[in-house]
């Protein structure tokens, strides 16, 4: 599945990784006692940001609206969120 992605999907994937890290660290700053809550909130924010970016492209007519771009960003963000979560559990 991943090898068939076009170049722009990989860009969204790679941008999603630091986005997930930043969202997770921010959520952990506001909810330091509950890693699960912080992870769920950062995932919800990640989905919202990735899909909203594509939705704005569709509404304004600028850029290219494609759902797979949002999915690629979300998958990358999950890696970022998961990496911080794993580091905090060690």
Image (cartoon, grey):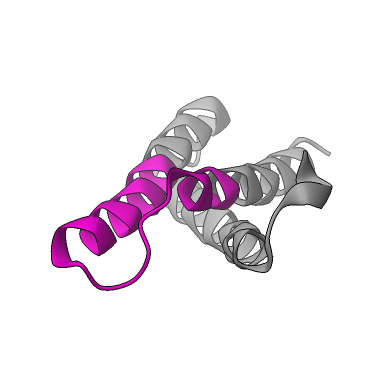
In this rendering, position of residue 69 left or right of residue 44: right
Would residue 62 be counted in the magenta stretch? yes
Query: Residue at image x 77%, y 49%?
Result: 4
Left or right: 10 in relation to 3: left
The mark tally for this picture is 0
Quarter of the rendering occupied by the C terminus: top right
The foreground one among 64 and 40 is 64
Q: Position of residue 17 (x, y in %)?
A: 64, 58
Residue extending farthest bottom: 62
The answer to whether residue 28 is left or right of residue 44 is right
Image height of 47 relative to 15, above or below: above
Image quadrant where one finds the N terminus: top right
Q: Nearer the viewer, residue 32 or 69?
A: 69
Residue 34 vertical placement versus 13 (above, below): above
Horizontally, is 44 left or right of 3 in the view? left
Relative height, residue 35 to residue 8 (above, below):
above
Q: For the point 47% across and 54% down, which residue is it?
A: 23
Q: Nearer the viewer, residue 89 or 67?
A: 67
Residue 81, horizontal then vertical, whole percent: 62, 45
Q: Start and end of the magenta stretch?
A: 45-73
Answer whether residue 56 is magenta in the image.
Answer: yes
At x 41% / y 41%, what residue is drawn? 47
Q: Position of residue 37 (x, y in %)?
A: 45, 28
Q: In terms of depth relative to the viewer, which is nearer, 49 or 61?
A: 61
Query: Does the magenta stretch mainly form a helix, a strand or a loop?
Result: helix
Residue for point 50% across, 53% down: 69
């Amino acid at each position: 599945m991943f090898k068939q992605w076009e170049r722009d999907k990989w860009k969204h994937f790679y941008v999603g990784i630091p986005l997930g890290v930043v969202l997770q660290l921010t959520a952990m700053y506001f909810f330091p006692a509950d890693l699960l809550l912080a992870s769920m909130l950062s995932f919800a924010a990640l989905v919202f940001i990735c899909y909203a970016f594509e939705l704005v492209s569709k509404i304004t007519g600028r850029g290219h609206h494609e759902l797979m771009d949002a999915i690629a960003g979300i998958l990358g963000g999950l890696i970022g969120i998961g990496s911080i979560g794993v580091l905090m559990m060690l």
